[in-house]
Amino acid sequence: MACAAALVASLAPGPATAAGEDGDVEAKPFRYREMSRADIEAELIGRAVEGYYASGATFTESFNADLSSDYRDANSATSGLMSFKGDTFCFVYPDNPQMSGGCFVVWQRSDNCYDFYATLDGQAFAGFLARSLGADWDARVWRQDARSTCPVTPIS
């Protein structure tokens, strides 16, 4: 139990700034965070992403401003529709019944790395600790318009 408490404490936000030796203020380091609908809209909507599933299969998808999407993987390409249920980000692919779609809680892992966790009624299947550690995700993506900051080796 003490280890879990120490881990949670290590994930808590630290001081907003720290003074360097020369008195300059350093920027606060990036903290892994669960994204709200507003965060997702600002970071991902209107952009294309690349990514992979926990299985290692790769894909690309454009998250269009009109909440349509264009999905492509090694086996298929299809159009989709996106929506929000609160802060949960949902996908359906009406033109391709083999695509399951679903709803996801999104956590930003680093500046350009986003983990998608499948949900049921807004509750992620992966526990809070797993999400906090960046484990047990269903898909990991990064924006195509910038260099990926995702780990090189999948950890899910």
Image (cartoon, rainbow, N blue to C red):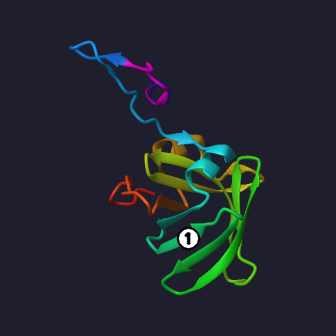
- Location of residue 39 by image quarter: top right
x, y percent for residue 134: 47, 48
- Identify the residue position indicated by label 1 in the image: 61
Camera-side residue of 25 and 104: 25
Is residue 55 rendered to the left or right of residue 86?
A: left
Camera-side residue of 9 and 70: 70
Task: Identify the residue at image location x=74%, y=50%.
Answer: 122
Task: Identify the residue at image location x=68%, y=47%.
Answer: 37
x, y percent for residue 55: 47, 70
Is residue 89 rendered to the left or right of residue 48?
A: right
Give the secondary structure at mark 1.
strand
x, y percent for residue 88: 70, 52
Q: Which residues are magenta?
A: 10-17
Residue type indicated by callout 1: Glu
* Residue 53 in view, yes or no: no
x, y percent for residue 139: 53, 62
